[in-house]
Amino acid sequence: MAFDIDMIKKVYANMTERVDAAREIVGKPLTLSEKILYSHLWDGKPTETFARGKDYVDFAPDRVACQDATAQMALLQFMQAGKPKVAVPTTVHCDHLIQAKDGAATDLKHANDTSSEVFNFLESVSNKYGIGFWKPGAGIIHQVVLENYAFPGGMMIGTDSHTVNAGGLGMVAIGVGGADAVDVMAGMPWELKFPKLIGVRLTGKLSGWTAPKDVILKVAEILTVKGGTGSIVEYFGPGALSMSCTGKGTICNMGAEIGATTSTFGYDDSMERYLKATDREDVAAEANKIREYLTADDEVYANPEQYFDQVIDINLSELGPLLNGPFTPDLSTTVGREMTTKAKENEWPMQVEWGLIGSCTNSSYEDLSRASSIAQQALDKGLKTKAEFGINPGSEQVRYTAERDGILQVFEKLDAKIFTNACGPCIGQWARYSDPKNAPKNSIVHSFNRNFAKRADGNPNTHAFVASPEITAAIAIAGRLDFNPMTDTLINENGEEVMLDEPTGWELPPKGFDVKENGYLEPVADGSGVEVTVNPESERLQLLEPFTPIGDSITGAKLLIKAFGKCTTDHISMAGPWLRFRGHLDNIANNTLIGAVNAFGKKTNFVKNQLTGEFGGVPDTARAYKAAGIKSIVVGDHNYGEGSSREHAAMQPRHLGVAAVIVKSFARIHETNLKKQGMLGLTFANESDYDLIQEDDTFNFLDLNEFAPDKPLHIEVVHADGSKDTIALNHTYNDAQIEWYKEGSALNLIKKQNA
């Protein structure tokens, strides 16, 4: 039986009436995305039409999910909200703090030993406030959510950008910062700008070496890392109907890499099969009762150009396997000859040292079974892997079932290392090098979602390429980046030329899923007696102090850093070894912007301290300004803050005295996180004004006392030679968000309202 079945029944009971009302108000057929959005309005039954990409709307999500690295800060904030229990079903999943090194058993024991303080804190807070807790080793948050909590037509938010994975089961699932999660956990409305809609029509059918992963790799090539910003991507067409539920999840998962608010598919037979296979026949039965409400109206998919803001067509029968990378998930290359040319032109290392399969993107039973069919061929045909091989199952249920069915043993016979059911290398938790900063130039291929520099192993010289599990397995066996399994031969241990056959696998386990211990802990019914303690001397956890309002008079602020080029949340707040400080704001602040490239000198973590004239690290310089009572300013390029939803990338600069972040454009989640923490997230009205900012600049805000929606702000930039430039800055703050700024943070306002 499903978790929270009564809640799901209630959602479905409201959905028909609310969708019918929305269709009448909007005056036209509705997409699936609109049906879910309009049926989850905070005020209940729809009464007005919302303008896409313009209107801020209050929603009532059905549930919240948090992973351990972000849950620490989210729950530390919730503890200040003054609530005895979460208002909606909420879960915490321990998947980020487990390092991949020696293999599952050893690595999990090491994680439990070294991070017990954090795990115990998360478990006790979960118990106190009625939150479901998934222990270390239980699995990766998004796979566990798909197996247990996602349901067609639902809305959820999660403190991880790949929350969008649940779109594979027909949800609108959105990645957010912890402060957003606190709103929903505290029983308050959750605000989102009503998204634009991108439709992707899939025709034809996947076959051979082409996989669902190749669909999103192609979409990433088309839309780039910012082309989906502010939009929901809705997939449809006969190609969508022919795909598995977990394949749909893979496609939705990587929608985070195009900046999309989320991605989703309409309810279909594959979702029904998956619900039944994962012991949720009751959810499938309820969904079947309102099936037509859980997909778009027929007219929408028949004439999508009339209902979507943009339509993309992809013929799956013509799509071939792709490799995306290095250093960005939207640089797409067809496997084989095109890769040979590109690799030579760009001096990408042709030898592949590792092939990694897993992460929240591709760790399902289907993914492992198809990749293992390639591994089995290598055994049968006398081939040895030229690259090392690593496997991360997505959940204990997947791992247990795959082991029962002999899938994991196939990998082990090829000397693959089976890591813990956790994120591992995908989020920088890979102990590959003792000195990653000085590690050699190399190439790896993985089935993950992100491949920014230093993302997997901390080595800036690792060229990471994203591919399907099948292609990853084939390239790991061949050991060459430009290997094309459809045309190329390999020499086996007997000196014979052999070819790999097309992969095969199972959509769902033929003998059903099974698990001995799934790792779930139910919270006590009454948590009022549960004590949550944080040692004041702890280096891992720190109780939060409310932020002081920045105020309406900012003068004499100093430039902290002018970031050049791509500046993701990994650049602003690195993961990897820094994950251990995610619950301690002052300690984690020591990595603030150390990965950002300074436009002056093109170095990382090397900026000028205007008070001394000396150069030093970004966090040290920020602390010097803060100690002197001087606010600082961060300037950035396009799509600033893309990538992970980690709100640390906003909280850390805020803690260090940064008052405003001024950029050419923002990634959606990061802009919201800045607002939530009571900071100014502003964009140049004229992008070329970025070029006016000089290393010794001082900033004076001229009209911050008139801060209002749709009204640009202006700053006076004073240069070292005494000359000045006045620059116009745009913003997207509405009245409620301006109130967050005035109060010092959204959390301060919640506490005030609950006092």
Image (cartoon, grey):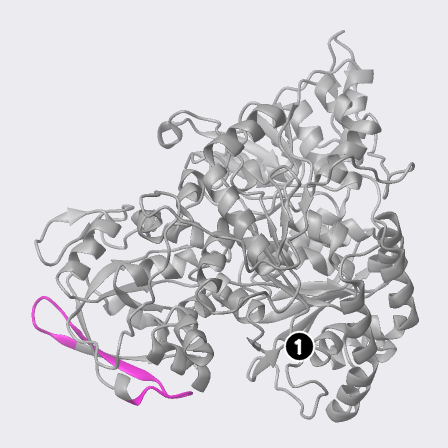
Helix, strand, or loop for circle 1?
A: loop
Q: Number of marks in the image?
A: 1
Q: Up-down: is 641 above or below 721?
A: above
Q: Which residue is mark 1?
A: 309
- Residue at image coords 27%, 48%: 602
Q: Residue furthest top?
A: 494
Percent position of residue 149, x then y? 73, 57
Decide if residue 381 is on the left or right side of residue 617: right
Q: Nearer the viewer, residue 547 or 214?
A: 547
Quarter of the image where the C terminus is located: bottom left
Quarter occupied by residue 98: top right
Q: In the image, is residue 612 above or below residue 48? A: above
Q: Based on the displayed image, in which of its 4 quarters is residue 287 positioned?
A: bottom right
Does any portion of residue 717 appear in the rendered image?
Answer: yes
Q: Quadrant of the N terminus?
A: bottom right
Q: Tag 1: residue type?
A: Asp
Q: Classify residue 618 as left or right of residue 33.
A: left
x, y (%) of residue 405?
84, 29
* Front residue of 639 and 268: 268
Q: Residues within 10 Å of mark 1 (few under 14, many from 20)?
A: few
